[in-house]
Amino acid sequence: IVTSTPALQDIASMSILCSDKTGTLTTAKMSIIPDSIHAAEGFEKEDVLLFASLCSNPDKKDDPIDRATLQAFEKDEAGKKKLEEIGYKQESVIGFNPEVKRTIGFVRKKDGNIMTVAKGLPAKIVDTSAGGLDSGEIQWKCEKAGEKAFVAALEEKGKDLSKAGYKTIAIAIYEGDAREADAPVFKFVGLLPMIDPPREDTALTINSLHHANISVKMITGDHQNVAKETARLIGLGQNIHPGEEIRTTANEQQKKEMIWQADGFAAVLPSDKREVVLTLRNEYGVVTGMTGDGVNDAPALSAAQVGIAVEGATDAAKNAADLILTEAGLSPIYGAVLESRRIFARVKSYVVYRIAASILLVLTLSIVIFVTGCAVDSLLVIVLALLNDIR
């Protein structure tokens, strides 16, 4: 669906496509492998999945992480039995925010007290100030956040899982209502690994885009290792930088060169996506496309010459986009590029033909006049030009 007519011309001359990963390059059908769950000391694997489910919104069925968590918990008989015994009930949830990168659930226990459960990016669950203080309502640290051995072991486990293509979600709990505590100290529960396989047609489509002289850059909020593994599977380069480098590189020229040479960026914020698009567009003068599906993608979609909202995108993304896809994946984009280039080629051929025909007409009349010395009536010239147009 075309919402901006100039986008049909821009997509024909598009040189770089910045693509979101989840739902565009991958299926967004995440699944949890129970055997790969990592439980912290004092907890079992079923505890990790149990608390993750209590921090998931059952009404938000379009969220791939919550959907995968709840589906996995439904199959976990030990976890469901434990939930019946302890009698925990979810009361409310603070939904995921792309800036704070975490979700918080509030659970009512049998004795009437409140427990706070959090799930999200491991670094932000261990210490919410990691990477800089954010705008989250609740800020905390886990019990062992200051122990180097604990942090190093957790990072190593996360790297091992991400190298295998797993997206890791961390879980932590607080005995009480964290909204009422000044500096709550959470207990780290464990890591929940999820896998989001690439679409079957992604590798072929990216290869086709490369043959069409369109470079593809992956921009994702997932861990750098997950992005690299996905890039390897779909035929993209491995030069993928963490989004933090965009925010911390002081030398503007170095930042521009990094953005130009990178094959993608991982663990990005919405502002990082917009900066990448604007740098490619304004500093290097290339026609840049951007795909996205969420509210956090809207600024980058509006900044690109060709903003593309993928199938199933939110209303905010659709309103900011120039093109709205009605089919999943990247293949419709390649089809749009080919069709736009065909239209442009036909228009160009017609313009060249008309210019050549007009030059031929002028030269012929000029030669006749200068050789014969015969004056040609202006009305006849006009009639001849009109008949030439009709032909």
Image (cartoon, rainbow, N blue to C red):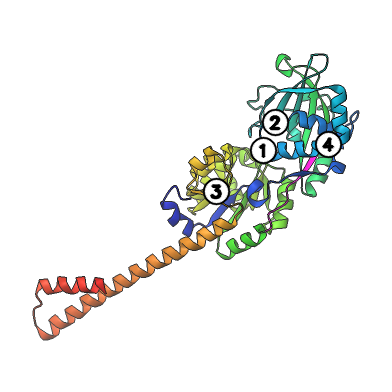
Which portion, as a residue range, is magenta? 191-200
Mark in the foreground, 4 or 3: 3
Disc 2 vs disc 4: Cβ atoms closer than 8 Å? no
**SS of the residue at dot 3?**
strand
Dot placed on the residue nearer the N-terminal end, 2 or 4: 2
Residue 195 painted magenta:
yes
Amino acid at dot 2: Asn
**SS of the residue at dot 1?**
loop
Disc 1 vs disc 2: Cβ atoms closer than 8 Å? yes
Which numbered marker is on residue 290? 3
Q: Is residue 378 left or right of residue 301?
A: left
Residue 229 vertical position relative to residue 159 in the rendered view, above or below: below
Dot placed on the residue nearer the N-terminal end, 3 or 1: 1
Q: Residues within 10 Å of mark 2 (few under 14, many from 20)?
A: many
Amino acid at dot 1: Asp
Q: Quadrant of residue 162?
A: top right
Q: Quadrant of residue 183?
A: top right
Q: Residues within 10 Å of mark 1 (few under 14, many from 20)?
A: some
| Quarter of the figure that contains the C terminus | bottom left
Q: Residue under label 4, please give it.
A: 154
Which numbered marker is on residue 57? 2
Q: Spatial distance from mark 3 to mark 1, Cα to Cα?
A: 21 Å
Q: Spatial distance from mark 2 to mark 4, Cα to Cα?
A: 26 Å
**SS of the residue at dot 4?**
helix
Image position, residue 205 (x, y; %): 62, 60
Q: Nearer the viewer, residue 326 or 366?
A: 326
Q: Quadrant of residue 375?
A: bottom left
Dot placed on the residue nearer the N-terminal end, 1 or 2: 2
Dot placed on the residue nearer the N-terminal end, 4 or 3: 4
Q: Residue under label 1, please give it.
A: 63
Q: Residue at x 76, y 44 (%)?
A: 31
